[in-house]
Amino acid sequence: MTAHERFEVERGQTRLAGEHAGRGPALVFLHAGVADRRMWRAELAAFASTHHALAYDRRGFGESHGAPAPFSHVEDLAAVLDALGERQAVLVGCSQGGRVALDFTLAHPDRVRGLVLVAPAVSGAPAPAAPAPSVASLAASIEEAEGRGDVERVNALEARLWLDGPQGPEGRVDGAARALFLEMNGVALRAPSPGAEREPPPALPRLGELRVPTRVVYGDLDLPHLQERCALLARGIPGADLRVMPGCAHLPNLEQPRAFETLVRELLERLDG
């Protein structure tokens, strides 16, 4: 197995921490907002034999911390690529990582070869309609625990919402995957604010501008409005295809890593073959 090498990229008074492995075309994994780069370690190991696979912690996650300051996730990603000597990359982004991937591609279309978007957030997307009672109850419980400052309770409830999925039973995902989620999200919940993000232009009205091979992925136990958004993206991005992972919620690579790797590899074969 190829060893992972840690790296740091200075961005003002913040250091972005990451790890990478392998050689070849660049393949960047962008983590969800309830995780950090560790959610992608299986993928870095799986793709290091054919690609320069890398992942980093966004500001306020994992090991990437510093003094609060205005920042841009798009500019941070560009700085990471520049520091590692990569002009172009395929981007694989989950949830908030998918939003960064979309915004970066619209800002720097010449630097992206392909996209895999996993239940992505989308800048400019409207607020979802009234949620199902089970989702509304979970959201209210999270808000109440946040108001009490009960980080442990918030973490447990967010594992219920994002890892198990509101359409699956509580505790559906256990063992190492649950322990990793609670550790990653616990760090993010306790981290100080990184500062104010300079918001990019809304991506939703500009989906038709995307001109790179794109695959949209979601789990069928994820939030219903996110499943609907994924279908909207697949229709709105020229040439995009849509793949559903049965029996998974918001972080399908943690649940079914081999199946997820196959979905990524199929797109890479279209690009590199």
Image (spheres, grey):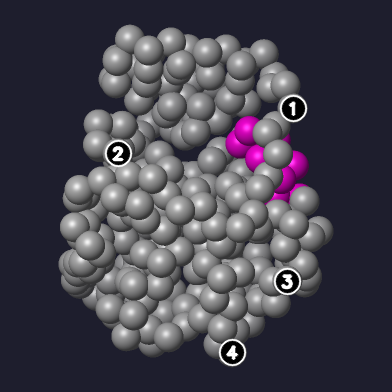
Give the answer, above or below, for where 35 lies relative to 16.
above
Name the amino acid, label 3. Answer: Glu
Q: CA distance from mark 2 to mark 4?
A: 43 Å
Of callouts 3 and 1, which one flags the residue occurring earlier in the amino acid sequence? 1
Residue ID at (65%, 64%): 215
Q: Kindly state the secondary structure of the residue where label 3 is placed.
A: helix
Q: Nearer the viewer, mark 4 or mark 1?
A: 1
Q: Kindly state the secondary structure of the residue where label 4 is placed.
A: loop
Task: Write down the quadrant of residue 266 in the picture.
Answer: bottom right
Q: Which residues are magenta?
A: 222-231
Name the amino acid, label 2. Answer: Ser
Q: Is residue 212 left or right of residue 36?
A: right
Of callouts 2 and 4, which one flags the residue occurring earlier in the amino acid sequence? 2
Of callouts 4 and 1, which one flags the residue occurring earlier in the amino acid sequence? 1
How many residues crowd around disc 2 within 10 Å: few (fewer than 14), some, or many (20 or more)?
some
**Residues at marks 4 and 3 touching, judged by CB atoms closer than 8 Å:** no
Work out which quarter of the rendered image holds the N terminus and state it.
bottom left
